[in-house]
Image: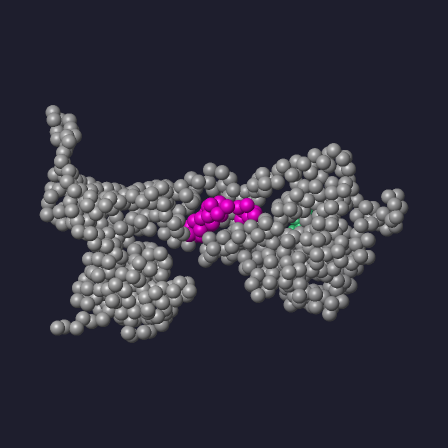
């Protein structure tokens, strides 16, 4: 008796479907190993089947493993097939074979040059009911086939790599091509995205073959229950394969009931018959076929050519769908603003109304009790001892500089890439800003260049006294290094945290990271009011006392006792009342900001330069005031986004030293090329803590569309 060649298969991918494939190979005594990116899951399945769990490189290297079954996400198929074929393995791959015709063609070329067996998991080609249907069609029971209609509906997991067409229709296309034995002459398709913008979840596709044979495929994830049917109509009758029926009635034959009387079509009650089909598990049949093909070196029914034909139809349908639907722009009936806080307002409206009504009732529009309450709550949130609220983030900086005693002839180092407000108060006080280049990753002031800033100040004949750091876009500057450098150089450090309220470093929040920190409550800021506002944070009691005095005309012991030069810069009571309610929801919003930023990062990965999040080991929490991407042709992208109703803002289009009022002030030697490049590329896209995934998808899709149009 001939001894059967052992087929040792490693099943790669132990997800929902993967475990079924694993069992099928095990039942065929052809399972040698399992593998999954989720090592715990792989170990569990391996234990259940008494085989080892292995990683992909080890599987490829292991000569005792003769075949692989690839049950991973479709985006990985083409690569994995190539590696497996080059390693001399037989390959079974789940549908779709690849995600493009070009990938499928490359696979086909490789397979045709190899001695390996290759099979695509178009499972319905192995379904006993389909095989019975196919045999009857081939025997001519229907006469000439005129029309085929295939439907595959059911609530589905919405994928990002594939739409419903690529996920569901390979089965239908495979069956239809199996019945017709030819490629369609034309393909039309229409897709709709009801569940999530940008991904077609419902697709209707029409294939036209030679001899006026038409086939229609309808697939959808937007359906409450599973429905899978194939209807083949010929001159003599119709065969219906309804996979949702019990085995006794999965396949039915309907005699043709259409007759023509005096030129009019008439339907008659025709007879129908259920065709009995032997109950056999399609997956088992399919795996059995693969194992037999490997053993006998036969070509599988669903071999690489069959797989390629299916991909060609899928790609033609995708192209047709793109030309006809214009899905993303259609769903953009509404403009997408940079910041939309309507959801926030809905959440806290009742409490806001109550707070505002209270202020109106008490009539303390200036110095109302809400000011003190807010200052206390801000102090306890940030972990600093004193908070002095004021009229804006710009005033906060001016007050801080007045308190620290900035004089004409002094020089203050500032990053060249920031909002003008960082440098403005320095100039207003007659001192000199020195522009320092930024770090290319964090975009904050580069600690390595501080010494050069001091040199530039001295060269300009000024006394270098301090620096103002900026936590650009909400990411804290490198305070650890900046503190030690500034103290070595005898500079004070003021943190401009206008964009970074809520951010933290090693658990210490912005507000407690410098001897004085300023922030802004401008509406679009992480903690924004319904108007202008700002605050200064310090744990230095002397500075705090000075700040309190300066922001109310240099007041001494009482209102009309003036002890120093000051200004009027108070926060309105009504703004404090609003901010108190906003502070309540702020921690949750900060969490949401992380989620929204991570979502953009995944949607835009590889398309444009996305912001670098702080590495986890630095223990830095980003406040994500904006989500600011980078690309070379920023102006054209902004135009494109505008044309589809999406707002965007270049934050900021010029480095400070290139703006008229600041041109005359020095930069460090060598200038600030990193800041210059960044300002020519940055573009902030809509971002706020309540931005939903759908809207982010639309924005990202528009960016992707633009980038693709540029590379075509
Ligand atoms: C970095 C930076 N500093 C200061 C400010 C000034 O804040 P405000 O607008 O509240 O005066 C802003 C505001 O945009 C800013 O982004």
Picture coordinates of residue 80, whole percent (x, y): 33, 64
Q: Residue at x 43, y 44 (%)?
A: 197
Q: Residue at x 31, y 49 (%)?
A: 168
Circle count: 0
Picture coordinates of residue 437, whole percent (x, y): 63, 62
Given residues 99 and 322, the one toward you in this image is: 99
Do we see residue 134 in this rendering? no
- Magenta region, mostly helix, strand or loop? helix
Q: Which stretch is magenta? A: 685-710
Above or below residue 389? Residue 613 is below
The quarter of the rendered structure image containing the N terminus is bottom left
Q: Is residue 690 magenta?
A: yes
Picture coordinates of residue 693, whole percent (x, y): 48, 47
User: Residue 458 sits in which quadrant?
Assistant: bottom right
Q: Residue at x 57, y 52 (%)?
A: 591
Above or below residue 531? Residue 103 is below
Picture coordinates of residue 377, whole percent (x, y): 71, 49
Given residues 285 and 203, the one toward you in this image is: 285
Given residues 551 and 22, the one toward you in this image is: 22
Do we see residue 22 in this rendering? yes
Left or right relative to 147: residue 219: right
Left or right relative to 581: residue 340: left
Given residues 495 and 581, the one toward you in this image is: 581
Q: Is residue 384 magenta?
A: no
Display colour scheme: one colour
Q: Residue at x 69, y 38 (%)?
A: 355
């Amino acid at each position: 008796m001939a001894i059967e060649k052992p087929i040792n298969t490693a099943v790669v991918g132990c997800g929902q479907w993967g475990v079924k494939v694993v069992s099928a190979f095990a039942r065929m005594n052809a399972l040698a190993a399992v593998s999954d990116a989720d090592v715990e899951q792989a170990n569990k399945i391996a234990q259940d089947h008494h085989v080892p769990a292995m990683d992909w490189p080890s599987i490829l290297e292991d000569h005792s493993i003769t075949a692989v079954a690839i049950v991973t996400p479709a985006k990985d198929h083409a690569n994995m097939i190539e590696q497996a074929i080059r390693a001399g393995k037989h390959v079974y791959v789940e549908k779709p074979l690849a995600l493009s015709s070009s990938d499928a063609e490359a696979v086909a070329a490789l397979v045709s040059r190899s001695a390996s067996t290759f099979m695509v998991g178009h499972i319905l080609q192995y379904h006993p009911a389909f095989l019975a249907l196919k045999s009857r069609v081939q025997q001519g029971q229907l006469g000439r086939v005129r029309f085929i209609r295939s439907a595959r509906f059911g609530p589905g997991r919405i994928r990002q790599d594939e739409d419903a067409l690529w996920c569901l229709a390979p089965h239908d296309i495979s069956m239809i091509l199996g019945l017709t034995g030819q490629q369609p002459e034309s393909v039309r398709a229409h897709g709709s995205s009801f569940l999530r913008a940008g991904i077609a979840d419902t697709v209707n596709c029409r294939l036209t073959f030679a001899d006026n044979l038409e086939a229609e495929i309808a697939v959808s994830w937007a359906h409450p229950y599973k429905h899978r049917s194939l209807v083949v109509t010929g001159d003599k009758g119709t065969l219906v394969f309804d996979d949702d029926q019990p085995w006794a009635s999965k396949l039915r034959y309907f005699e043709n009931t259409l007759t023509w009387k005096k030129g009019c079509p008439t339907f008659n009650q025709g007879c129908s018959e259920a065709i009995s089909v032997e109950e056999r598990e399609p997956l088992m049949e399919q795996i059995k076929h693969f194992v037999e093909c490997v053993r006998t070196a036969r070509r599988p029914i669903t071999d690489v050519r069959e797989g390629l034909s299916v991909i060609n139809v899928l790609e033609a349908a995708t192209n047709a769908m793109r030309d006809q639907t214009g899905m993303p722009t259609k769903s953009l009936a509404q403009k997408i603003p940079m910041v939309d806080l309507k959801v926030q307002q809905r959440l806290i409206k009742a409490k806001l109304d109550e707070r505002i009504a209270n202020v109106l009732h008490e009539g303390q529009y200036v110095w109302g009790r809400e000011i003190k309450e807010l200052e206390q709550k801000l102090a306890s949130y940030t972990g600093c001892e004193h908070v002095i609220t004021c009229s804006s983030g710009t005033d906060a900086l001016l007050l801080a500089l007045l308190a620290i005693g900035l004089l004409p002839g002094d020089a203050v180092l500032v990053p060249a890439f920031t909002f003008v407000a960082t440098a403005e108060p320095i100039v207003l006080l007659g001192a000199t800003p020195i522009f320092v280049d930024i770090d290319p990753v964090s975009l904050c002031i580069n600690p390595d260049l501080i010494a050069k800033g001091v040199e530039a100040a001295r060269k300009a004949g000024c006394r270098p006294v301090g620096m103002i750091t900026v936590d650009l876009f909400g990411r804290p500057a490198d305070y650890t290094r900046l503190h030690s450098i500034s103290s070595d150089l005898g500079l004070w450090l003021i943190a401009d945290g206008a964009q970074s309220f809520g951010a933290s470093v090693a658990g210490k929040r912005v507000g407690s990271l410098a001897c004085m920190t300023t922030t802004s409550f401008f509406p679009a800021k992480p903690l924004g009011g319904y108007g202008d506002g700002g605050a200064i944070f310090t744990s230095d009691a002397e500075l705090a006392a000075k700040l309190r005095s300066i922001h109310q005309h240099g007041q001494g012991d009482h209102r009309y006792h003036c002890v120093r030069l000051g200004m009027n810069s108070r926060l309105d009571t009504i703004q404090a009342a609003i901010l108190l309610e906003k502070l309540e929801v702020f921690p949750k919003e900060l969490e949401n900001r992380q989620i929204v930023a991570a979502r953009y990062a995944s949607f835009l990965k590889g398309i444009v330069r996305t912001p670098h999040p702080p590495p986890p080991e630095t223990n830095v929490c980003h406040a994500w005031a904006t989500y600011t991407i980078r690309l070379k042709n920023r102006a054209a992208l902004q135009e494109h986004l505008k044309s589809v109703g999406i707002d965007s803002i270049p934050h900021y289009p010029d480095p400070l030293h290139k703006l008229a009022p600041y041109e005359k002030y020095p930069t460090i030697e060598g200038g600030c090329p990193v800041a210059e490049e960044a300002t020519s590329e940055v573009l902030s896209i809509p971002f706020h803590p309540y931005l939903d995934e759908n809207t982010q998808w639309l924005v990202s899709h528009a960016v992707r569309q633009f980038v693709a149009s540029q590379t075509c």
